[in-house]
């Protein structure tokens, strides 16, 4: 039997793909959660819903677990509407499924459901007529740039404290977020992406790893920006703060 050569617990889909390419045997399962979160952004406090996918399985003989935030939705105008966030989350999730399957990691393709959310959070104000058609993601703008159109992106990184509300507990969590202001084809759009997070109460232990994961994800994204000749100024989370 092949001995596992894993010396780092995977924290990203890219890590799983890298381990698969070294010949590791990998299993992968997903569990979804749509979690109400109280954010404290400067002097503004608001509640949003984050769309989490928990990835778990075995690499060789070692178990792993990590979670990834696919979107943030608000029943107000402080971030994409919840109805739009579902669509955004599923588009990013579909892209990750393809990456995993292309690497040979087979798993069931499940997606976030707005109907499930409405059942779980009775009374939430959902915009029934929200425009969910033509929802664009960052990678759509990468493709627009590859078609020869100028795309300018202004990036602002923030570390935002929050409180997640699970069924029987509250969890203080800090999110490493990126705000992207994208200008192309005579229009400017705004996007938010979560690149990592850590338990606030375990900041000393978990924050360095979360920053490394976030910066690794940013590096991959910037590489795609470069390939598409997008105009931007790269920035990263500061490990010293």
Image (cartoon, rainbow, N blue to C red):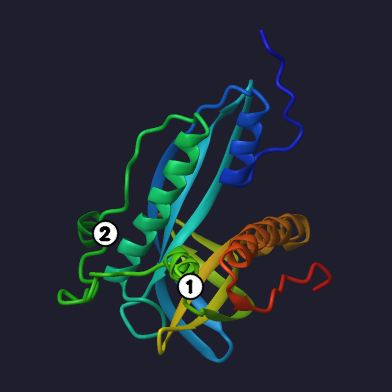
Give the distance between the C-alpha atoms of the residues marked 1 and 2, in whole angstroms: 39 Å
Q: Nearer the viewer, residue 93 or 239?
A: 93
Residue 117, which numbered label? 2
**Which quarter of the figure is the N terminus placed in?**
top right
Residue 193 in the image: state x and y as whole percent.
Answer: 51, 68
Image-based side of 86 in relation to 207, left or right = left
Quadrant of the image occupied by residue 29 = top left
Q: Residue at x 60, y 47 (%)?
A: 12
Nearest to the observer: residue 226 or residue 98: 226
Please state the horizontal and vertical placement of residue 114, each as a whole percent of the image.
24, 59
Instruction: Kindly give the residue lying farthest to the front in the view shown.
Output: 148
Specify the farthest residue to the left. 129
Residue 148: assigned label: 1
Residue 138 image point, x, y percent: 47, 68
Q: Residues within 10 Å of mark 2 (few under 14, many from 20)?
A: some
Residue density around tag 1, few if under 14, some if 14–19, many if 20 or more, within 10 Å: few
Residue 199, image quadrant: bottom right
Q: Residue at x 59, y 67 (%)?
A: 225
Report the mark closest to the observer, 1 or 2: 1
- The residue lying toward the viewer, choosing from 47 and 228, is 228
Badge 2 element: helix
- Per the image, label 1 sits on a secondary structure element best described as loop
């Amino acid at each position: 039997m092949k001995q596992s050569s894993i010396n780092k617990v995977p924290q990203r889909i890219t890590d799983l793909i890298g381990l698969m390419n070294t010949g590791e045997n990998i299993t992968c399962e997903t569990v979804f959660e749509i979690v109400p979160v109280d954010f404290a952004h400067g002097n503004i406090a608001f509640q949003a819903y984050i769309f989490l996918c928990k990835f778990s399985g075995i690499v060789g003989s070692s178990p792993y677990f990590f979670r990834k935030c696919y979107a943030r939705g608000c029943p107000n105008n402080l971030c994409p509407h919840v109805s739009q966030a579902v669509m955004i989350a599923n588009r990013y999730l579909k892209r990750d499924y393809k990456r995993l399957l292309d690497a040979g990691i087979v798993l069931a393709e499940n997606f976030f459901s707005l109907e499930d959310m409405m059942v779980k959070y009775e009374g939430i104000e959902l915009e029934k007529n929200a425009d969910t058609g033509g929802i664009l993601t960052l990678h759509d703008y990468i493709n627009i740039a590859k078609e020869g159109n100028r795309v300018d992106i202004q990036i602002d990184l923030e570390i935002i404290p929050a409180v997640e509300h699970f069924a029987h507990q509250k969890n203080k969590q800090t999110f490493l977020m990126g705000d992207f202001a994208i200008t192309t084809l005579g229009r400017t759009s705004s996007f938010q992406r979560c690149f990592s997070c850590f338990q606030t109460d375990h900041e000393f232990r978990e924050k360095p790893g979360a920053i490394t994961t976030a910066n690794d994800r940013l590096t991959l994204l910037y590489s795609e920006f470069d390939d598409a000749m997008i105009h931007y100024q790269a920035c990263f989370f500061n490990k010293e703060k």
